[in-house]
Amino acid sequence: MYYVYILYSEKHDKYYIGQTNDVKARLERHNNGLENFTSKYIPWILVGFITKPTRAEAVVLEKKLKNLSRERLQIFIAKYCNRS
């Protein structure tokens, strides 16, 4: 299984969308500064994720979500995302 996850930095009011096969480990990498792009926005909180059966499907959804406006992304999170 693969996951498309959405992180939020309250400190910087910024969302980040990615995909992985281990959400918990990936969140730890982001919050430990091991990911270049997200290190300056620490701390991150996981606001939701979507499960996909293959990495290819996760990548397609990730790209679609990255193209949404902030308002539409927030609607998507409220409607479709798992939070645990």
Image (cartoon, grey):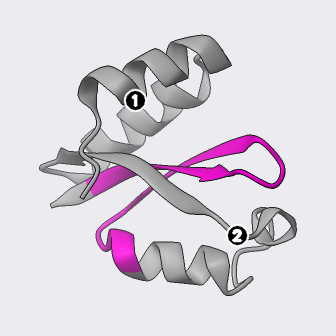
- The answer to which of 34 and 44 lies nearer the viewer is 44
Residue 32, quarter of picture? bottom right
The residue drawn where x is 50% and y is 73% is 27
Mark 1 falls on what kind of element? helix
Horizontal relation, residue 73 to residue 75: left or right: right
Residue 65 screen position, x and y as percent: 50, 27
Q: Considering only vertical position in the picture, is 12 above or below 31? A: above
- Identify residue type, mark 1: Ile
Main secondary structure along the magenta-highlighted residues:
strand
Residue 46 screen position, x and y as percent: 46, 57
Comes first in the chain, label 1 or label 2: 2
Please name the residue that numbered disc 1 is placed on: 77
Residue 64 screen position, x and y as percent: 48, 24
Q: Considering only vertical position in the picture, is 32 above or below 81? A: below
Horizontal relation, residue 24 to residue 63: left or right: left
- Identify residue type, mark 2: Pro
* CB contact under 8 Å: marks 1 and 2: no
Q: Considering only vertical position in the picture, is 79 above or below 31? A: above
- The answer to which of 77 and 50 lies nearer the viewer is 77
Cα–Cα span, label 1 and label 2: 19 Å
Residue 52 screen position, x and y as percent: 18, 46
The magenta region covers: 3-24
Please name the residue that numbered disc 2 is placed on: 43
